[in-house]
Image (cartoon, grey):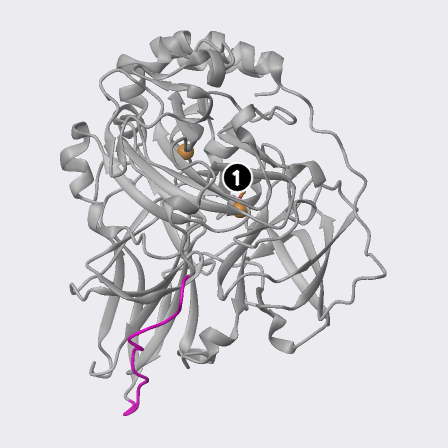
Amino acid sequence: MSDYNNYNSRRRFLAQSSLGLLAFSGMPALLNAMEGMQAMPKMPPRKASPDFKPDVEIELFCKQASVPILVGRETKVMQYSAKRLQGPKEAVTEIPGSYLGPVIRLQKGQKVRIHLHNGLSEATVTHWHGLHVPAEMDGHPLYAIDPGQVLVYEFEVLNRAGMNIYHPHPHETTAKQVYHGLAGALLVNDDEEASLGLPSGEYEIPVVIQDRLFDTDNQFIYARGMHDRMTGFYGDRILVNGRADFQMDVDSRAYRLRFLNGSTARIYKLGWDDGTPITVIGVDGGLLEKPDIKPYVMLAPGERLDVWADFSGRSEGSQLVMRSLSFSGVLPKMGMMMHTGSLPVGSDYPIFTARVARKVSDSPKLPATLSKINRYQITDTANPNKPVPIAISEAHMAMQLNGRPYAYNDVQDFERIPVNTIQLMEIFHAHGGGHGRHATSEGQGAEHQGGMMGMGGMRHGRMGGGMGMGGMGGGMGGMMMAMAHPIHFHGQQFQIVSRSVDMATGDDYATVRDGFIDSGLKDTVLVMPGETVRVIKPFQDFKGLFMYHCHNLEHEDMGMMRDFLVV
Ligand code: C2O
Ligand code: CU
Ligand code: CU
């Protein structure tokens, strides 16, 4: 959305498309947003500090490469690679033949220094999704570096054990860089986890799920037009750990599968093909307190899942397929019509196959208790009666949060958070129209900070900055564009307090509702159409800018992102 020419060509495209009508009512909002946009300043790349004594030191390179994915020609990708300068050997493990970055494995309490080398032909910066690090180390687009530059990160691992992600976060090009291959898993281990003796080594397998679209020459195709970005971009090939038709050969025993949805937009409903329930032992922020057995599990972009998969008792040669099962209601009804790919979101398709290759007699037992989670109560929050609003605004060409597109240095009152406070937050769809306000489990019609919520849904004066959301906010526009959004907060992980859903979503919601795991710590939560989710999030230790955004990365790049300023 950076220049008027671009805008005009999109307008032309839209006028010809079935969404032309919607495009017109969205226009004033977009024009205002473009005027208000502040350019991201350039910071000089941070250098190593001589006082910092790292336990682990890594050089991380971003570069162009070619890798074999499909039969025939290699695919051009962007790729992370790493070199360990200091620290234990397990700190860096390459995934042979994959475009995915190496698995980085850290211990809680370690001091880590990472030199990020930009070997691309465009700006980039790396974010440690899930890690609680100072604002300056968090990979804010403000710190993006140009080709040839090096950025040095230094931080201590404060997180409990869990699976995190490292991925690029440059302004408006996050999705494109992730799609082309820049992403990797970052695992943290700690003593609490180690005491459980969970399956490890070859029995702990990362499962990074991504979808890609290839041309006839085996090259990635990426977002071709506006509607690819409105709904998010979807490929028709499912890759696991960078491979098509992924199969794992397993022993007849228990495994620990570490899932990560690394797709830019695709949401999965994971289930075993023979109806075996999924035994979940952890989510984004690490282990649950006790295992949770689910018929299926929803996994949205940016979310992680720790699964106990027990193949003991299965015969040699038998196979179990992890599928994405059918569901509905995550895309706008109109988007669904336009989304004509051969692998529709919500259809039923395989993700990978586990084949029992060897019969063994011994298998570890699933622990009955896994971890202790320090929980906050609503009464611990600084704002029990005025949750910080996270309003999802869905308007054509204007997927936004709190009524505004991302802009640097555009922090609103309620986005300033005092450091070392615990905040109650409410994520909801801002459109009024057919969706009335709904009761939450804490009572009806709680007022947000700054009194922005009223009967009509959103108050434009405060939240929208006079952006003319009215035309799209209510009625048909809002209803037609309603879709699911994985909302992600940088900084510390949060607890999910409640979900409530309005009546209009009935049948669709029933296809996903048993697949949420709300008992663990999260940094990304899937918010369905018509759904309101309350979370409690701590803002401890660090001041500065911490982003919150939709982890549908096309949405993020369209501006569905904001900053909290922790002061
Ligand atoms: Cu994984 Cu700000 O993102
Ligand atoms: Cu993040
Ligand atoms: Cu979104």
Number of numbered discs: 1
Q: Is residue 215 visible?
A: no
Q: Which residue in the structure is indicated by mark 1? A: 175
Asked if residue 329 is among those painted magenta in the image, a careful observer would answer: no
| Callout 1 crowding tier (Cα within 10 Å): few <14, some 14–19, many ≥20 | many
In the structure shown, which secondary structural element does the residue marked by tag 1 occupy? helix
503 sits left or right of 466 in the view: left
Q: Residue at x 33, y 28 (%)?
A: 446
Residue type (three-letter) at the residue carrying disc 1: Ala
Residue 288 spot, x, y in % from top left: 36, 64
Compared to residue 53, the image places residue 164 above or below, namely above
Residue 246 spot, x, y in % from top left: 38, 63
The answer to which image quadrant residue 480 occupies is top left
Q: Residue at x 39, y 43 (%)?
A: 535
Q: Residue furthest bottom?
A: 361
Which quarter of the rendering shows the C terminus?
Answer: top right
Q: Residue furthest left?
A: 507
Query: 39 and 518: which one is in front?
Result: 518
The answer to which image quadrant residue 74 occupies is bottom right
Q: Residue at x 46, y 45 (%)?
A: 537
Segment colored magenta: 360-373
Query: 387 and 13: which one is in front?
Result: 387
318 sits left or right of 392 in the view: left
Q: Residue at x 45, y 9 (%)?
A: 468
Residue 345 spot, x, y in % from top left: 29, 41
507 sits left or right of 134 in the view: left
Q: Main secondary structure of the magenta part?
A: loop
Compared to residue 125, the image places residue 529 above or below, namely above
Asked if residue 369 is among those painted magenta in the image, a careful observer would answer: yes
Q: Is residue 137 visible?
A: yes
Residue 331 spot, x, y in % from top left: 30, 32
The answer to which image quadrant residue 20 occupies is top left
